Image: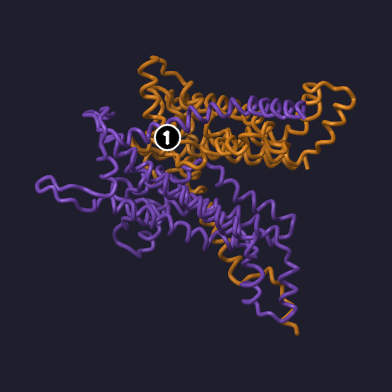
Chain colours: A orange, B purple
Amino acid sequence: MVDRAFDIRRLPGAATLAITCFVILYVPMIILVANSFNTGRVIGEWEGLSLRWYAAALQNEAFLNAAATSLILATMAAAVATVTATMAALATTRSRGFKGEGAIHLILNQPIMVPEIVLAIALLIILAQVKQITGYTGLGYLIIAHSAFCIPFAYMPIRARLEGMDLTLETAAADLYASRFYAFRKVTLPILAPGILAGFMLAFVISLDDVVISDFLKSPGQDTLPTYLLGELKRNLTSEIYAISSLLLLISVLIVAGSWLVTRKKI
Amino acid sequence: MLAKDHAMRSDTRRRWGLALPAVIIITLFSILPLVVVIAYSFLTPGDFGGVKWMLSFDGWFSVLFERDIFDDTVSLSSAHMTILGRSVALSLATTLITLILGVPTAWFIATRPAGQRAFWLFLITIPFWTNLLVRTIAVQEMIRADGVFNRILLGLGVIDAPIQIMFTNFAVLMGMAYVFLPLMVLPVYSAIEKFDFRLAEAGYDLYASRFYCLRKVILPMVRPGIIAGSILVFVPALGAYVTPRIMGGGKSMMLGNLIEMQFGQGRNWPLGAALALTLTALVLVALIWYTRLTAGGPRRG
């Protein structure tokens, strides 16, 4: 009788494999961060603790430019993606079906159905021509290209939030003679805000994470942090790479922690 | 009746108006470029990259075949077949490894007490959101010739010379399994989390064996999560570019790298376009298979 009273939740071996999984996930990242504090130039030869490579990175103009480009690009692309995705989400939710709803839905999800490398070469082909014809080689191409593949990611949480929203609130506002715009601003938008914030963060990270599309589309001097890192990896392997990687890792941790706090507070 | 019709039409117009900016951006910067890729796959390669506007099926022909320069005999292109086969095989192997490690991990997290669950989930979410390139660099550091593994093995005296793991299929597999692992854990976790464990306990109380419980009660519940996780790993693995480039180099290329090569030193844009469309088709097949599978699920159950 005693051995029947077991907990079904405890599958033999699951805990061991799970711990193995966490070790596998974290050991390489911890070693990477540890390497970034190494004094020595040669990777792997431990010569002592220092912030030397962080200092080197912060004095490296190419790195600072790449960081600025990444920040501007991710912010702008996420902003464009979030605004347009919010509008699209308002269009596609809370309807009893309208003409072309399926088409809009398909278009909005199209970028996630195509491999990144395919989108990259497709954009390369078309934008090489456009750059030649217009003569404009600014960051605008990257911003709109990033917005395009960020829209599906911004769209998802915003749409989910809207679908879970109580329609009667807006009706109540309308009954109290609020104009459509006033009701939207004072009722819909505040309820929607966590979804919009989540969508923006998602889009920001997706843009910041992109290597392939940026690498194919960038004009000279438009390196982002990931494309700069990729280039450095080819050129020379110094511990500065680890310092830059660790900084990117830190950004991810901050964003995850931040969104964790935001979603917790709202519940 | 007429007024209702009118109201409906104006509602449709308003909704299209709201969706329009997003629709235009995606159409111009994602759909239109793909249409151009289709067109380019039927053109003649230019001398220094680019294309000549002459219809040609050579791009598509070269995806799978090659013509002997001397006697014009047509045979399967061994280089392309190898890369295609490797891409599919490594993506399947990556899915399998992430299943073996990811499912127990998801199970482990879902069965923690509610208070601890958030912490373990947090640990999975961090690598999930960390830059793919950074994580690839982290794996590379482990298995490089003078990386962590080789140093430890040399230090212990197990080996005399560093083992060369980099630039092999195995290195690409390790890299991809590492970077895509969180993509498996999260959907499987959310499937298990929804599961009411009292069902399994009820089965067990009715003297079902532990294995029988697992197969008949738990597996059907977890199945959607496993399918979603597999597709989430398999699809990006098939189109992977960064990880195979760093871990495999020129020796263990995948489809993504072969495509890129045609636009770089290969200077064969039509072939690159045809290869890119082949990859897209493979991904779409996987996605359609997935929607079929999930749409058919509830009816069967």
The relative height of residue B65 versus residue B276 in the rendered view (above or below) is: below
Along the viewing direction, whichever of B119 and A139 lies nearer the viewer: A139
Relative placement, left or right, of B252 versus A95 is left
Which residue is pictured at 74% across the width and 55% down the height?
B115
Outermost residue on the left side: it is B70
Outermost residue on the bottom side: it is A1
| Residue A27 visible | no
Which residue is pictured at 54% across the width and 36% down the height?
A206
Q: Quadrant of residue A138?
A: top left
Q: Quadrant of residue B12?
A: top right
Which residue is pictured at 68% across the width and 68% down the height?
A9
Q: Quadrant of the N terminus of chain A?
A: bottom right
- Number of numbered discs visible in the structure rendering: 1
Outermost residue on the front side: it is B1
Q: Which residue is mark 1?
A: B34
Q: Position of residue B292 (x, y in %)?
A: 55, 55
Q: Quadrant of the C terminus of chain A?
A: top right
Q: Position of residue B19 (x, y in %)?
A: 62, 29
Q: Position of residue B137 (x, y in %)?
A: 43, 44
Q: Tag 1: Cα neighbours inside 10 Å, few (<14), some, or many (≥20)?
A: many
Looking at the rendered structure, the secondary structure element under dot 1 is: helix
Q: Position of residue A19 (x, y in %)?
A: 58, 61
Marked residue chain, label 1: B
Along the viewing direction, whichever of B155 and B277 lies nearer the viewer: B277
The relative height of residue B110 versus residue B254 in the rendered view (above or below) is: below
Relative placement, left or right, of B112 versus B229 is right
| Residue B227 visible | yes
Relative placement, left or right, of B188 versus B111 is left
Name the amino acid, label 1: Leu
